[in-house]
Structures are given as structure tokens and as C-alpha cells.
Image (cartoon, rainbow, N blue to C red):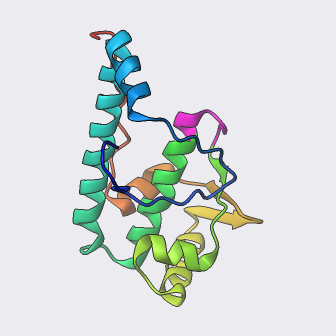
Amino acid sequence: MACDLAADTIQAATDAVVEVLPLSVFAKVFHEHPRLAAMLFMWAQEERVHLMRRLSLVGKMKGPQRIAALLLDLYERVLIGGTETGRSFNIPLTQPELADGTGMTTVHANRSLKDLRDSGILTVRGGRVTIQDIDKLRAIANAAPRLRRHTNWL
């Protein structure tokens, strides 16, 4: 945002609608709705902190930890989005995409996912993940639950 060229490259895992907004629209919204601007700033900072933590851990994690961290992150994002409830969610990623998202080869990622399935922590069927033991998954991923933001002070 606010750059001549895109600062980030993203790829949607599912169908998505993308809208390009001129910076002048952001300026107007931020000026007229400062609480919204503050909330977007908070969200961006939370994402930055989360990304930096994941990046610092990836080089230190073993395969099952990387898969656990990615699946936990996807699960928590689905919960925030309100599109799923319970411990199951769709994972529209191919095996090579799962490997790429964790910095592993496809063979290593598949073996790591199998380790998590064999230990009874999760099941994967037809592109749907069911977390059987969220506490064990968090422990393997070395991850605390995402903190819920408090906006009542804004």
C-alpha cells in the first residue's frame, strides 16, 4: 500500500474478489473514520508480529512442527472469518502448495503430515482437516492461541 509497485505478492487459496482502491479512497476513509483507520493499523501490526514470529521459527522447526503451525494458523483464520465452527475446516491446498508454504519438499511435507495423522492429532479426508487434539497440535507447533484484540478503547 502507498507504493508505486506492490510491496507484497499474495495468492488466494480459494475463489476471491479483488478490488483495487485508489489511495485517495483510503485517505478519505481514514480521515472520516479514524476508528476504522486505527483498527486497520492494529490488524496490520498483529499480522506483522505473527509473520515475524513464524519466520523466526521456520528455520528452527522440524517438519511436523511446520505443518502443525501452518494448519493451526489456517484453522484460527477460518475461526476469525466465521466460515466454520468446530474443529474441521476445508484446506484447498495441494500437497506441493502445502510443502511450499512450509519450506519443505513435497515428500518431506507429506511424511510430516502423515506423522501428525498417525499420532491421532488430526485427520485429513477429501481436502478437509479435522483437528482431534488442539492442545497437542498447539504444543507441537509451539504456538499459543491467537490473542483476541480489544477495540473498546478506540
Residue, x 65% and y 44% (percent of image)?
17
Q: Which of 64 and 90 is in front in this view?
A: 90
Count of numbered circles on the image: 0
Residue, x 48% and y 58% (percent of image)?
10
Residue, x 27% and y 64% (percent of image)?
55
Figure quadrant of residue 153: top left
Residue 154 on image: x %, y %? 29, 11
Figure quadrant of residue 128: bottom right
Residue, x 35% and y 44% (percent of image)?
1
Q: Nearer the viewer, residue 27 or 60?
A: 27
The span picked out in magenta is 79-86
Residue 90 lies within the magenta run: no
For residue 108, above or below residue 118: below
Residue 35 on image: x %, y %? 34, 13
Q: Which of 94 and 120 is in front in this view?
A: 94
Principal secondary structure, stretch drawn in magenta:
loop
Q: Which of 51 and 69 is in front in this view?
A: 51
Figure quadrant of residue 13: bottom right
Residue 119 on image: x %, y %? 54, 71
Left-right relation of 73 to 88: left
For residue 119, above or below residue 142: below
Q: Residue furthest right?
A: 126
Left-right relation of 89 to 109: right
Residue 85 lies within the magenta run: yes
Residue 120 on image: x %, y %? 58, 65
